[in-house]
Amino acid sequence: MPALGDPSAADQDSNDSHVAVVGGTSSTPAIHEATSTVPTPGSTPLEPTVQAVADSQGQNDGWLELRIWAEMFHDAQQQRIATVNRAERGGVDPALYAPYTEALDAAEKAVRRGMILAYRRTVPDELRNWVKSTHGLGEPLMARIVGHLGHSRWANPHHWEGTGAARVLITDPPFERSVSQLWQYCGHGRPGRAQRGASAADLAALGSPNLKMLVHLAAECCVKQKASPFRLVYEQARIDYAEKVHTVECVRCGPSGKPAQVGAPWSLGHQHGAALRKVGKEILRDLWQVSA
């Protein structure tokens, strides 16, 4: 699910942006930051194949297992969606491909169960209790978020060295990140979108696309719940943005080929997207605080 209504870069507050690349420079943004090395009490042993990878990276605390489950769930979900779309576009009789799509659906559900169980074993009680008490959040979505993120306070960055067959992944020293660094890594720090020809450092500075999408989804879920504290954040943001005008041209607020001009008011869609972005940042702030 793509992020909706991502606000214009130049019209967003910049005092909380973290413009440096979070976790070190990486030529592969998807592996820009790995799971945390902070031990978690009560973790259970990993499966043998996962344990071998964890031992090789000095990680055996369950966060790596959760990350693998989250990535497998993402892959399974995308495969199911792509397969169904491809078959429907081709006008194929559903009965012909039903066994295959049913198998994909069963695999996705099995991976989802494994991810949630890993989440319950790995994530500290304080964070899981916060999720349970917050309307709009839930185990499956938060398992995906922390699965891709790891520990919200501690980062374990990596970077590539060398080229071709000689390229190796180097582990950098772990560090405790600030809330602004968390925002950036989750795509809620520096506003903007990836541009054609952007460098690896520029892409990394925009954060993880998967986490940006998941946090946006969490914000959407929260604002639909009247009892959620984040609903109030959204409503206040809509009031704050109601009178905003553009300081630069905005392609999102104008028809194709005719961007909104400087001085033109933000469209309702622009206001909605900016408010959701603010909700996402507040969700991440609370996540960061709970994980102290």
Image (cartoon, helix red, strand yellow):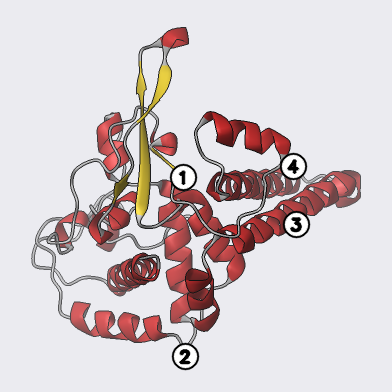
Amino acid type, callout 3: Lys
Viewer-proximal residue, 74 or 174?
174
Q: Secondary structure at mark 2?
A: loop
Residue 36 at least partly seen: yes
In percent of width and height, residue 240 lies at: 19, 81
Q: Which residue is mark 1?
A: 35
Q: Is residue 211 above or below residue 136?
A: above
Q: Which residue is mark 2?
A: 227
N-terminal-most mark, 1 or 3: 1
Amino acid type, callout 4: Gly
Distance of label 4 from label 1 (alpha carbons): 41 Å
Distance of label 2 from label 3 (alpha carbons): 29 Å
The nearer-to-camera label among 4 and 1 is 1
Q: Which residue is mark 4?
A: 90
Amino acid type, callout 2: Ala
- At 59% from the left and 32% from the top, the residue drawn is 53
Distance of label 4 from label 3 (alpha carbons): 26 Å
Q: Secondary structure at mark 1?
A: loop
Mark 3 neighbour class, 10 Å CA radius: few under 14, some 14 to 19, many 20 or more: some
The nearer-to-camera label among 1 and 3 is 1
Left/right placement of residue 231 relative to residue 107 reads left
Distance of label 1 from label 3 (alpha carbons): 24 Å
Mark 4 neighbour class, 10 Å CA radius: few under 14, some 14 to 19, many 20 or more: few
Viewer-proximal residue, 63 or 239?
63
Left/right placement of residue 18 relative to residue 221 reads left
